[in-house]
Amino acid sequence: MNEQPVERSRRKVRDGVVVSDKMLKTVVVLVEEKKPHPLYKKVVTHNRRFKVHDEEQQCSVGDRVRIAETRPLSKEKRWRVAEILEKAK
């Protein structure tokens, strides 16, 4: 029996901007997605806010961050900060 190891599916990754850092070890990240409307083809902006785990509390408001999906950490937290792309000015 030559079994292959089961590969874990790729985790979702998003880029966004930190809009709140008032909680301990948690930041709120706004992810803006632009998609064409299915029928009318006009580009529509969809905004979504994620509660994201920030263990070292390095993020501040205005930072561009990359977030990655993870196991449930609390009632609303299912994402963690993968890296800080750009610090706020």
Image (cartoon, helix red, strand yellow):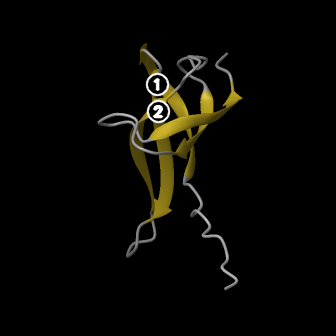
Is disc 1 placed on a helix, strand or loop?
Answer: strand
What label does residue 52 carry, if any?
2
The residue under label 1 is 27
Classify residue 87 as left or right of residue 17.
Answer: right
Please, what is the three-letter code of the amino acid marked with disc 2? Val
Please, what is the three-letter code of the amino acid marked with disc 1? Val
Percent across and percent down for residue 74 are 34, 34
Percent across and percent down for residue 27 are 46, 25
Between marks 1 and 2, how big is the CA–CA gap?
5 Å
Q: Nearer the viewer, residue 64 or 70?
A: 70
Badge 2 density bin: few <14, some 14–19, many ≥20, Cα 10 Å: many
Quarter that holds the C terminus? top right
Residue drawn at 57 percent across, 64 percent down: 9
Quarter that holds the N terminus? bottom right
Residue drawn at 53 percent across, 19 percent down: 61
Q: Earlier in the sequence, mark 1 or mark 2?
A: 1
Residue drawn at 59 percent across, 18 percent down: 56
Residue 82 occupies quadrant: top right
Classify residue 37 as left or right of residue 80.
Answer: left
Q: Nearer the viewer, residue 64 or 50?
A: 50
Residue drawn at 40 percent across, 43 percent down: 48
